[in-house]
Amino acid sequence: MRPGYKYLPRMQLYPSQTLFNMYTEADDENEVCCVYDHIAKHDMLQNSNYIDIVDLLGEEEPYGPYNEIGIQKRIDAYLDVCKQWRDE
């Protein structure tokens, strides 16, 4: 396992694009698990700023956070937060 992956769970929160790149460049299942551990450690699935990373985990063909689908998901999550704030 390469050092960048080995120590990933101990590192500060990485941006979505960095994690996506690491996921796609992973050489084996252990490196993929390190990316998942980083996501879980920082509770990224509950943070609306990282809504796009959820799709990395569940889609058959993952896509990056800065293509059209990823950007639209960020916009939708932001609008949902705005609606909740407005309704309070």
Image: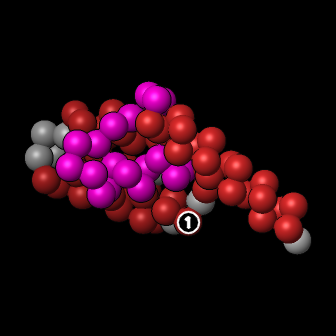
In which quadrant will I find the C terminus?
A: bottom right
Q: Which residues are magenta?
A: 50-68
Q: Is residue 77 left or right of residue 10?
A: right
The image quadrant that residue 1 belongs to is top left
Q: Is residue 50 left or right of residue 37?
A: right
Q: Is residue 23 left or right of residue 12?
A: left
Residue 64 in magenta? yes
Q: Is residue 83 left or right of residue 70?
A: right
**Residue 59 locus on image (x, y percent):** 27, 51
The residue indicated by pointer 1 is 46
Tell me which colouring the rendered structure shows.
secondary structure
Along the line of sight, which residue is nearer the eye, 16 or 11?
16
Alpha-carbon neighbours of circle 1 within 10 Å: few (<14), some, or many (≥20)? few
Residue 70 in magenta? no
**Which residue appears farthest toward the bottom when viewing the image?**
88
Along the line of sight, which residue is nearer the eye, 85 or 44?
85
Tell me what residue is drawn at x 34 percent, y 49 percent. Answer: 56
Residue 22 drawn above or below residue 84: above
Q: Is residue 36 visible?
A: yes
Amino acid, disc 1: Gln
Tell me what residue is drawn at x 11 percent, y 46 percent. Answer: 28
